[in-house]
Image (spheres, coloured by chain):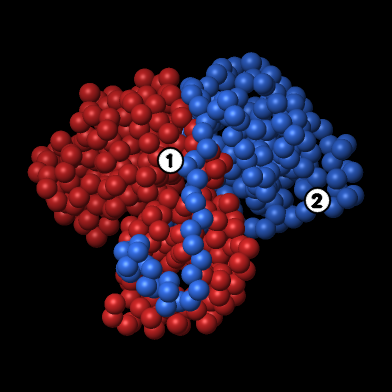
Chain colours: A blue, B red
């Protein structure tokens, strides 16, 4: 079974982002970029399926600027077999990404797509669900456990009140939550090996998709900043302040 | 044309995040509420009482009993032509279904809105709430999830909307509900609580979360946790407050043994009053706290429980 894993290049999760002074976006020049953490979990899960003999080939896909090939190299160093880069300067939104991925799925024929539940830059939490919709496939979102048996994927999902389990008839789309696994670090020999793994580059037009954004970014602003308050010296003082000053208890 | 809000219900009541979604929807036009599932009489009656609803639609079918995204999205697509906007709360269920419906409608969804500027223009947090984006949709129909903490929920009483049953499309889909394993809760839900008390890595074990209980009991608080505490296995993931967990904005948020990582702040920094208890006086949580107490939580928590027992 072939598994497709989309990976997104985002501002590293340790970076404190800064809004550009002209309000046009967030500063990304000279900022450390990494693979979206949820996508690392997706790559790891695909590798584990391959180690179990369930998956036969893992194709990592990234969409965006040329530098996304670095993100693909990371996936290859972790253990993906080959990469596909859909290269474009157009800022991609989930609908366009889902359409491009659908075209790639039709080209590659995977039985399973595993991807992060959300990217930590735009926090949309949408692309997996949208891809599943466009393909007419079932979806298992926010997965904390995945088991494949025959033609069924059993997915345990993180929901608001606890956990929920659904059974999906393959082919299907699964999106990852934090507790699904702990992604491995790529070893140096694997990083070297990854350099020789193939990456194919395509323009979006080849896939017959117009990637133009539907959401216009009007402006980006800093959120109102909270002022640090006061220190209290004791528990008794804290309770007294909450009662008489803040009046919240 | 009216707007449609999908309403989640539990035990016959409309959930608070959905009541916030109604509040957001009311800024866009006349609101119809949609209730889905089986045996909907009580839930539909509760929905009809929400102020601000002009009509309640009920879609009763076994396929909708567990909120599976596939049949629910098909229903939303069927109803969509009568509405300018489709909204739901940005809960696990809302986030699961709305993008699916949006893709079927060839619409780019607008996730987790925190503000409505006009019918096309919305404010939404990005980068874990470290920036606020204003976005304008070019789609003729909008599909939206609503950050519940950013909109005061409508009341549970005061309305008298008519109830109308709608047909449920028969669709084939490849998913099947197997089981739910829901945490037992004697406390208010995190996203609905007036007071939230959360523990972090500093709690050191799941066992010590018990120290939060008498305080939560006394304050009628929900108990939450940071991602670090969840990752360490102290408590289940549904306790998690943060970018990848729940977003809360209670009257009072008490952060205990939480350092204040960006991704945690994303989930609680809109709380009205924030209290931090941490033994590290340099912890970033103190930069957002209204009241900071530098103390060993294992001493401070029992003391806090005792102090709250005293009458003011």
Q: Position of residue B133 (x, y in %)?
A: 49, 33
Mark 2 — residue?
A186
Q: Between B122 and B40, which is closer to the camera in this rendering?
A: B122
Residues A6 and B263: in front is B263
For label 2, count other residues whose C-alpha is less than 10 Å away and answer few (under 14), some (14-19) or many (20+).
some
Whether residue B161 is situated above or below residue A95 in the rendered picture: below
Can you say which quadrant of the picture contains the C terminus of chain B? bottom left
Element type where label 1 sits in the image = strand
What SS does tag 2 mark?
A: loop
Pinpoint the chain carrying mark 1: B
Relative side of A5 to B286, left or right: right
Q: Quadrant of residue B170?
A: top left
Tell me whether marks 1 and 2 sit on the same chain. no
Residue A249 in sight in this render: yes
The residue drawn where x is 48% and y is 24% is A218
Rounded to the nearest angstrom, the CA distance separating label 1 from label 2 is 34 Å
Toward the viewer: A140 or B62?
Answer: A140
Subunit bearing disc 2: A
Dot 1 corresponds to which residue? B112
The residue at the point 26 percent across, 41 percent down is B22
């Amino acid at each position: 079974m072939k598994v497709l894993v989309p990976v997104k290049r985002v501002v590293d999760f340790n970076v404190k982002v800064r809004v550009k002074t002209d309000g046009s976006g967030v500063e990304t020049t000279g900022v450390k970029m990494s693979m979206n953490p949820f996508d690392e979990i997706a790559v790891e899960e695909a590798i584990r399926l391959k180690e179990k003999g369930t998956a036969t080939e893992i194709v990592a896909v990234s969409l965006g600027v040329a530098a996304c090939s670095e993100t693909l190299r990371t996936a290859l160093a972790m253990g993906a077999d080959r990469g596909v880069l859909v290269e474009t300067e157009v800022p991609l939104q989930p609908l366009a990404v889902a359409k491009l991925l659908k075209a790639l799925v039709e080209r590659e024929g995977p039985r399973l797509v595993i991807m992060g539940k959300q990217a930590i830059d735009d926090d949309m939490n949408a692309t997996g669900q949208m891809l599943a919709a466009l393909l007419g496939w079932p979806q298992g979102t926010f997965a904390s456990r995945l088991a494949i048996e025959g033609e069924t994927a059993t997915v345990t999902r993180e929901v608001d009140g606890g956990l929920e389990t659904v059974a999906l008839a393959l082919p299907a789309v699964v999106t990852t939550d934090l507790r699904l696994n702990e992604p491995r670090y790529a070893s140096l020999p694997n990083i070297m090996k990854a350099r020789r793994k193939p990456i194919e580059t395509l323009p979006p037009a080849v896939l017959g998709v117009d990637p133009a954004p539907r959401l216009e970014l009007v402006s980006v602003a800093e959120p109102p900043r909270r002022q640090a308050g006061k220190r209290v010296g004791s528990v008794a003082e804290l309770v007294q302040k909450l009662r008489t000053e803040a009046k919240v208890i | 044309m009216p707007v449609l809000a999908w309403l989640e219900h539990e035990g016959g009541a409309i959930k608070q995040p959905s009541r916030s979604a109604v509040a957001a929807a009311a800024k866009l036009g006349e609101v119809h509420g949609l209730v889905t599932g089986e045996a909907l009489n009580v839930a539909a009656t509760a929905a009809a009482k929400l102020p601000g609803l002009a009509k309640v639609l009920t879609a009763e079918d076994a396929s909708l009993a567990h909120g599976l995204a596939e049949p629910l999205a098909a229903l939303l697509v069927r109803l969509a032509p009568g509405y300018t906007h489709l909204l739901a709360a940005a809960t696990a269920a809302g986030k699961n279904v709305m993008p699916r419906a949006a893709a079927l409608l060839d619409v780019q969804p607008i996730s987790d809105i925190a503000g409505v500027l006009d019918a096309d223009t919305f404010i939404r947090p990005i980068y874990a709430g470290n920036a606020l984006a204003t976005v304008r949709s070019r789609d003729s129909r909008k599909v939206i999830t609503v950050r519940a903490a950013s909109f005061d929920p409508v009341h549970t009483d005061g309305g008298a909307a008519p109830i109308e049953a709608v047909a449920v499309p028969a669709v084939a889909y490849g998913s099947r509900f197997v089981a739910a394993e829901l945490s037992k809760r004697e406390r208010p839900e995190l996203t609905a609580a007036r007071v939230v008390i959360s523990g972090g890595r500093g709690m050191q074990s799941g066992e010590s979360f018990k120290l939060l209980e008498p305080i939560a009991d006394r304050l009628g608080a929900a108990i939450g946790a940071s991602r670090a505490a969840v990752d360490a296995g102290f408590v289940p993931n549904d306790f998690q407050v943060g970018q990848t967990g729940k977003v809360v904005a209670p009257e009072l948020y008490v952060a205990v043994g939480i350092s204040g990582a960006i991704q945690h702040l994303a989930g609680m920094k809109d709380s009205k009053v924030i209290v931090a208890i941490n033994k590290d006086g340099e912890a970033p949580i103190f930069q957002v706290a209204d009241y900071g107490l530098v103390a060993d939580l294992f001493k401070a928590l029992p003391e806090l429980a005792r102090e709250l027992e005293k009458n003011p």
